[in-house]
Amino acid sequence: MIRRAAQALFLLLLLGNDTHALTETKNLSDLNITVYAPDWIWQKNAINILVTIENTGTNSGDITLDLNLPAEYKGHFSFEDNVFNTQTLNISSGESVRYAFTNIEALGDVPRQTYPFEIVISLGETVATFDYPLTTIRGPVVSTATWAILLPGILCALWCIAFIIALRKFAAPDAWKTPSQLDHSKIPEEPWMDETP
């Protein structure tokens, strides 16, 4: 009974928890467009924004995708040269396409804040706009893979040194080389041991 209640509580918390990502779908004529992107990022880390487009109509066409960010914030990110250029995709009837804006890295030497990104998708004169606020948080304490390996190793080495110092203080020199003497006084003697044949 308690187990079932705990499972129900876990599912309730899991399903009732807000997701920390943008997942928004809009229709543009016969196109179903969904944008997937994280809504926060550590400084000194990169994000990718995925756009999926499904054509449920009978006509094919060219669509354009734009990722917009006010010019005063562009210096807060490192990105590939073409990430803010207009991208054109052709989508056939009954097909789906995906496009990703990749490697948008939040720099670490700027104040943490929320950035007003915007994804604009156009099909001719018809436009769908996705507002995408991205919040930066403090970067990780260990920023590179090398430090992620070295830091635990350094901590282990320090504890080994402390352990050796403690053993040297509380043990006799070279005690580990000398076998301990057996104490025979506590061994019970059986009566038959003193019998003579």
Image (cartoon, grey):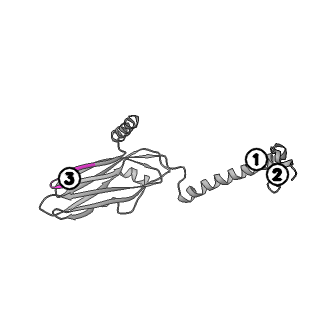
Above or below 44: residue 90 = below
Question: Residue 122's image quarter?
Answer: bottom left
Above or below 153: residue 8 = above
Residue 34, position as x, y percentages in the image: 26, 53
Q: What residue type is labelled 1?
A: Ala
Disc 3 secondary structure class: strand
Chain-order first, disc 2 or disc 3: 3
Question: Residue 191's image quarter?
Answer: top right
Residue 11, position as x, y percentages in the image: 35, 40
Looking at the image, residue 138 sits to the left or right of residue 21; the answer is right
Disc 2 secondary structure class: loop
Query: How far is the residue under mark 1 from the one under mark 2?
Result: 20 Å
Looking at the image, residue 67 sits to the left or right of residue 111; the answer is left
Look at the numbered discs 1 and 2 and tell me whether their residues touch, using CB distance below 8 Å: no
Mark 1 vs mark 3, foreground winner is 1
Look at the numbered discs 2 and 3 and tell me whether their residues touch, using CB distance below 8 Å: no
Residue 2, position as x, y percentages in the image: 40, 34
10 Å neighbourhood of mark 2: few (<14), some, or many (≥20)?
few
Query: How far is the residue under mark 2 from the one under mark 3?
Result: 86 Å
What residue is rendered at 68% in x and 50% in y? 159
Residue bounds of the magenta highlight: 24-31
Residue under circle 1? 166
Between 65 and 140, the one lying in front of the other is: 140
Residue under circle 3? 127
Prevalent SS, magenta region = strand
Between 85 and 130, the one lying in front of the other is: 130
Residue 163, position as x, y percentages in the image: 72, 49
Chain-order first, disc 1 or disc 2: 1
Residue under circle 2? 180
Mark 1 vs mark 2, foreground winner is 2
